[in-house]
Amino acid sequence: MLICVKNKMLSVLALVLCLVSLLCGCFGSDECRKHTDSDGNGVCDLCYSSVFVYFDFYNINDLHGKFSDADSNIGVDELSTYLKNARKTDENAVFLSSGDTWQGSAESNLTKGLILTDWMNELGFSAMALGNHEFDWGEEYIAENEKLADFPILAINVYDRKTNKLADYCTASTMVEGDGLQIGIIGAIGDCYSSIAVDKCDEVYFKVKNELTNLVKAESEKLRKKGADFIVYLLHDGVGQSYGSSERDVNRSQLSSFYDVSLSDGYVDLVFEGHTHQGYILKDEYGVYHLQNRGDNKGGISHVEVALNTATDGYDVRVAEHISTYEYANLKDDKVVEKLLQKYENQIDFATKSLGYNSLYRSGDYLRQLCADLYYETGVKEWGKKYDIVLGGGFTSVRSPYNLWQGDVTYADIQSIFPFDNQLTLCKVSGRNLRDKFFYTNNSDYFISYGDYGEKVKQNINLNSTYYIVVDTYTAYYKPNGLTVVEEYKKDVFARDLLADYIKNGGLAK
Ligand SMILES: [Zn+2]
Ligand SMILES: [Zn+2]
């Protein structure tokens, strides 16, 4: 127990030193049970070693499955090299994700996130917060990824409607350890339930606002009791505005739409955010940092180095920065990406072959309108004999890279632009809702298509009549639209599949 007793022959000096050490709680010349630093010089008064233990947190937000190098983003091959190097140089490097990790590329979507989860295992991630887009394929796929993951999927506020307990695939918090100190990590999803297709999350509900604050406070107290020296909060929500990469102070009202600043009063020490795809490094009135990066592996990642003071039990944030993709884009690729592409080859190979030629640059709006046209045509073909279909379309939102360049087009290309797995549905709608929600909607995410019959109805809608339209499931189940689902189209045929067929038939070649 007495580390300073190394020789059988005790010198008087050693004895005196040991007694002093015991009195001060310091147990030896180079290993103290508890350092003291009365002059605040960062060195233990007794054993002269540093009182600081460093932790380096590397957080990724909204990666959206960007696994391979593409026109508009780099892949995770260079990022893997960067993170592995960081692990070699930083004593305690902790890799985290604040959500929306999986969905948004062919490699990830075709493996339903598994290739990304596998990658996170290989790199040794400690935790990932659940994002709204983790629900895009349905809860069973979150559960499947959770089974594969060597790290917990954190969401303290996702509750099972039946059991009224935390959803099976979620964990409230976790702890990681380094140099005898413990880091608590709590994760939550923001108030974004309505941004998920209803049929993909109907088994759960999210606790938000005060309920969420209370959950996080209670969890923090629990973690502190278990010995947490520092608490990181991964929150899949954030500020709706970019402030760039220089640090800036914010007041509580600038955070209040998603974060209760009373959490910074001793409950959480650092917050990594996501969801809004904005870049910022903010410091709130309690000195707690909030970081987010732009996402899609375009803006880079967030890095915070913290020095935990083992004498005072306080901490200093030594570094709070964005590591831009430029800092790693030219590194040598790590082999892990190649290895995983081979592992999942059967599921993703077809996606990299050309479907056909695209003769012109096609803007996002062009593609969205084209999707609406394809919804309408497909709907009429499928149900037109039985029902008078007024229009097709709905939520045909596009994602990064948002457009198509001239050249050969692969399924992977359009998978990135239309990542959403929403089926076509035939719905009933009242004349009033047909007018307000579709023909004269002010929702810029909605694109519609209709023929002569639709035009006639548009000019003369009977507000109390019932009409038939073809939309995606997201639009169909969005309650304010007031739609009733009549029939669903083939399972596993989504907007991008209609577009793929169109391209195969030379639709974009002219
Ligand atoms: Zn996102
Ligand atoms: Zn999100």
Image (cartoon, grey):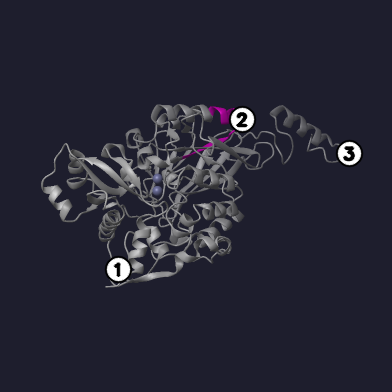
| Residue that mark 3 sits on | 8
**Residue that badge 1 annotates:** 507
For image coordinates 53% across by 55% down, the residue present is: 115
In this rendering, the label closer to the viewer, 3 or 1? 1
Residue 2 in sight from this viewpoint:
yes
Within 8 Å of ligand 1, the CB of disc 1? no
- Residue 91 or 184: which is nearer the viewer? 184
What residue would you read off at disc 2?
226
The front one of 183 and 142 is 142
Q: Quadrant of the N terminus?
A: top right
Taking 345 as reference, is 425 above or below it? above
State the SS at label 2: loop
Rounded to the nearest angstrom, the CA distance separating label 1 from label 2 is 62 Å
Q: Is residue 226 magenta?
A: yes
The residue range painted magenta reads 221-234
Crowding at label 3, few (<14), some or many (≥20) Cα neighbours within 10 Å?
few
Circle nearer the N terminus (1, 2): 2
Depth check: give the residue in front, 343 or 301: 343
Above or below 336: residue 58: above
Query: Label 3, label 1: how many angstroms apart (C-alpha)?
Result: 89 Å
The amino acid on which the numbered mark 2 sits, given as a three-letter code, is Lys
Q: Is residue 98 placed above or below 284 in the rendered structure?
A: below
The image shows residue 50 at horizontal and vertical percentages of 63, 42
Question: Which is more foreground, mark 3 or mark 2?
Answer: 2
Circle 3: residue type: Lys
Rendered location of residue 70, percent (x, y): 42, 64
Mark 3 and mark 2 lie on one chain; the one further toward the N terminus is 3
Q: Nearer the viewer, mark 1 or mark 2?
A: 1
